[in-house]
Amino acid sequence: MSIYFTLFWEFFKTGLFAIGGGMATLPFLSSMAERFPWLTQEQLANMIAVSESTPGPLGINCATYAGYNAAGVPGAIIASVSEVLPSYIIILIISKMLRRFSQSKYVASAFGGLRPAATGLIAAAAWGVISIVLFNFSAFASGGIAAVFNIGAAAVFALMMVLTNIKPLKKLHPLYFIAFAAVLGIVFEL
């Protein structure tokens, strides 16, 4: 199977089944990182950090990066287009049918099931990223518990959780927190 078709199919499926926005694509991207040499779990974690701090949707940024890693510029284009194609097709279909079925209890029930499913997928992906950033499980076999836990990253994580939930600071643009965390990473060589 050609790399281009594989890229198209994998990112088409990601775009089709990742309901709930860019974060909902993370379980699919994590699965790709396990099955294909396009990116590693560590690259995925880095890609998420970069994608969240750059303009554009997370899913598209990740698709472009993975596609480029796999097959250069054509791969980036194929992965990006195939990531958004399902949404485009679905929106066209829904826009034609929504008026007719907007009051349907089945449609409302379907969305009632999709919301918690998307939340669960996002939580699972978040745990995957947190475990990559905060833990070094390979060090567990060779060293002590202290080597497993990234104390510096955990401190920055906890600090960001606290700072972003302080009422006066909630009004700040997220870019300030991202820049502050980057400075902390540089200063403490995280």
Image (cartoon, rainbow, N blue to C red):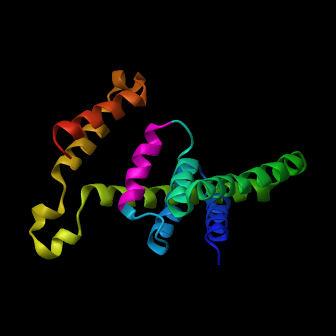
Q: Examine the structure image and report whether residue 139 is included in the region drawn in magenta.
A: no
Can you say which quadrant of the picture contains the N terminus?
Answer: bottom right
Instruction: Check the image and report above or below for 185 versus 85.
Output: above
Residue 189 appearing in the image = yes
Instruction: Give the percent coordinates (x, y) of residue 41.
Output: 39, 63
Judging depth in this view, the residue of 171 and 148 nearest the camera is: 148
Predominant SS along the magenta part: helix
Q: Examine the structure image and report whether residue 44 is included in the region drawn in magenta.
A: yes
**Residue ID at (16%, 51%):** 151
**Residue ID at (65%, 67%):** 4
Query: Relative to residue 171, is residue 9 drawn left or right?
Result: right
Instruction: Give the percent coordinates (x, y) of residue 185.
Output: 23, 40
Instruction: Check the image and report above or below for 160 versus 20.
Output: above
- Which range of residues does the magenta coloring cover? 42-54
- Residue 71: which quarter of the image? bottom right
Q: Residue furthest bottom?
A: 1
Instruction: Give the percent coordinates (x, y) of residue 109.
Output: 71, 58
Residue 165 appearing in the image = no
Judging depth in this view, the residue of 8 and 49 nearest the camera is: 8
Query: Relative to residue 90, is residue 71 drawn left or right?
Result: left
Instruction: Check the image and report above or below for 146 versus 187.
Output: below
Instruction: Check the image and report above or below for 49 versus 38.
Output: above
**Residue ID at (45%, 59%):** 125
The number of numbered discs placed on residues in the rendered structure image is: 0
Query: Relative to residue 105, is residue 60 drawn left or right?
Result: left
Query: Relative to residue 173, is residue 79 drawn left or right?
Result: right
Instruction: Give the percent coordinates (x, y) of residue 143.
Output: 10, 70
